[in-house]
Image: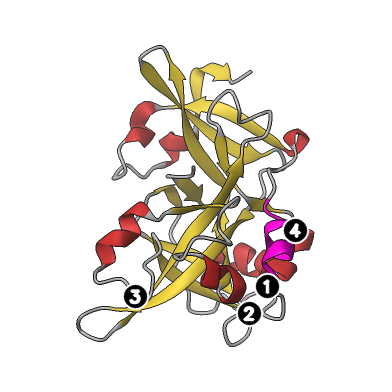
Amino acid sequence: MCGRYSLIADIQELARQFEFDGTGFVHEPRYNVAPTQSVLTVTNREGRKGEFMRWGLIPSWAKDASIGNRMINARGETVAEKPSFRNALQRRRCLVLADGFYEWQKVGKAKRPMRIVLKSREPFAFAGLWESWRNPEGEAVRSCTIVTTQANDVLRPIHERMPVILPREMEEFWLDGDVTDPAALTDVLLSYPDESVEAYEVSSLVNKATNNSPDLIVPAPQGLFG
């Protein structure tokens, strides 16, 4: 799964890389993004644009927003079948921008926090889905979920699942509103190549969702994960 991640890159850098207009966006470095928080996405709704959405997908038919707390991830293997996700897969896909994510590795009875990044240290895009829901006051709430798949060899010792990181050449395809074939879409929900990612242990400060500082991404004293 993916329950925490980071996005510390400058908004204009992100706008250039992911081809949206960053004018007027306010984005502070985020070292510990957590579910239910506002997250930066890119959609192809009314043209390619950056949008902030609530992390945790709220289906349009939901009675209240709390269901989104349990829908921060969507399994790629079943996303085309699940009622909560199948329409979004065909019509409402997005990029969820990040530059690293966290998983916790079981070590005996303890859990060791690990940060996973691209070796290039570049920002990247998770494959995301989004929905629009109206709250009791009639206001539209846009929310998203991150699609996951089986872990690659780097991640497998840490966790059995990983978020789908889209290769750069597949980002446009994922956002293309003319693509609606579920089989074609699920074919791209693959684990990221082993040789392009690395993982290292970080401080247990990341365990607390309210912590948000550069200390969270510094490698732990014992060094890189091997």
Crowding at label 2, few (<14), some or many (≥20) Cα neighbours within 10 Å? some
Q: Which residue is mark 1?
A: 19
Q: Compared to 35, does 21 lie above or below? A: below
Label 2 – label 1 distance at C-alpha: 7 Å
> For numbered disc 3, what is the local secondary structure?
loop
Residue 119 x %, y %:
70, 38
| Viewer-side label of 2, 1 | 2
Name the residue at 68% across, 58% down: 186
In the drawing, does residue 186 fall left or right of residue 133?
Answer: right
| First in residue order: circle 4 vs circle 3 | 3
Label 2 – label 3 distance at C-alpha: 26 Å
Q: Amino acid at mark 4?
A: Arg
Boundaries of the magenta span: 181-189
Q: Amino acid at mark 3?
A: Trp
| Viewer-side label of 2, 3 | 3
| First in residue order: circle 4 vs circle 1 | 1
Is residue 53 highlighted in magenta? Answer: no
